[in-house]
Amino acid sequence: MESGELRRRWAWGGVALPLGLGLGVVLLGLPGCDGKSAPSCEESPGALYEKRVAPLLHTDHPNVCAQCHAGGSMDLESFLRPDVCESMACLQAQGLVNLKSPESSVLLSWIERAEPDSELVTQQVIDEERQGFLEWIEHEAACGACADVACPDRDTPRCDADATLPSPFVPENDPGDCERETLERLFRGTVYEWRGRCYPCHFQEQEGNRLAPRWATELGTCEVAALFTQQTIVDSGYIDVDDPEQSLLLLKPLAVDEGGAGHGGNDKFTTHDQAYTAFLYWATRYAECSK
């Protein structure tokens, strides 16, 4: 991707507006740029949930939940709320759903981690489960039918700046492979470890500078918040896989006199800074694994 295109994506935050806003209302139901039809808001979220999601959670239906829940990563009760909008609200409260970029939702990423491990849990089952949840998330992103519903009786987890990050990798203990979990743990120990340099302007939950793209979050457990942030960075095009040092993730906060691209929040690090070294290490490893 050309640097000019990267800069334009940074300026706009690299995130498309929800389809249900502005002109998207007029275009609702027509094929999008990727050829897919937009969700129909004439269908209620409850009807869509019962058709596409609920069958995936029945105990007599093979699914990938056990692979995730065995590690305690997800709270199945979020899916089993008596009200479908409460279920969606609780998933958002845990940072598992990204309505600005449904494809980037942490929940989908965890489903993708599953491995076909039997005649019942096949790749087809995994793909169907991911598609069912994606359609439900896309419907809410486009239609906002559950926008006014909050997750009841639940403390929203947050990953505070001084929180201990779970099982991070740093350059010294990096296994060096390209497994999805390795890159996620490496992101936690490098970029997300230094997230304070980007706080509060680039965090979705903070006021900060309204012109700054909000690619980071502290919502959810630290594992979820870090993965949400990583997904947003990648999907927004902030990593140059051909030349990691030219990634906007590094150039924007870098001092201008050291080759930085200029930053509305002033310089955040130099090339001799530990934070810069950490950002560059992860960007380089991600780029290597993307080829």
Image: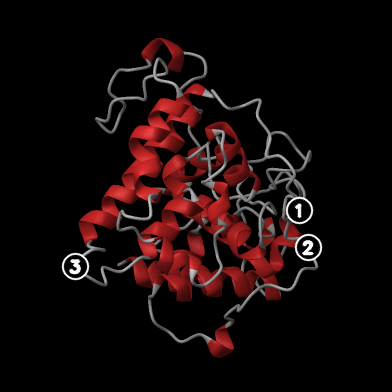
Question: Of discs 1 and 2, which sits in the foreground?
Answer: 2
Are the residues tagged 1 and 2 within 8 Å (C-beta)?
yes
* Residue occupying the far top of the picture: 26
Q: Is residue 281 left or right of residue 2?
A: right
N-term mark: 1 or 2: 2
Q: Quadrant of the C terminus?
A: bottom left
Q: What residue type is labelled 2?
A: Ala
**Badge 1 is on which residue?**
199
Position in image of residue 90 (x %, y %) = 62, 44
How far, Cα to Cα, is label 1 from label 3?
47 Å
Left or right side of 254 for 172: left
Give the colour scheme shown.
Answer: secondary structure
Q: Earlier in the sequence, mark 1 or mark 3?
A: 3
The amino acid type, in three-letter code, at marker 3 is Glu
Mark 3 or 2 closer to N-term? 3
Compare residues 175 and 280 and report the one nearer the observer. 175
Q: Which circle, 1 or 3, is nearer the viewer? A: 3
The location of residue 191, given as percent across then percent down, is 62, 67
For the residues labelled 1 and 3, say whether their Cβ atoms are less than 8 Å apart: no
Which label sits on residue 155?
A: none
Residue 161 circle label? 2
In front of the other: 233 or 7: 233
Asked which secondary structure carries label 2, the reply is: loop
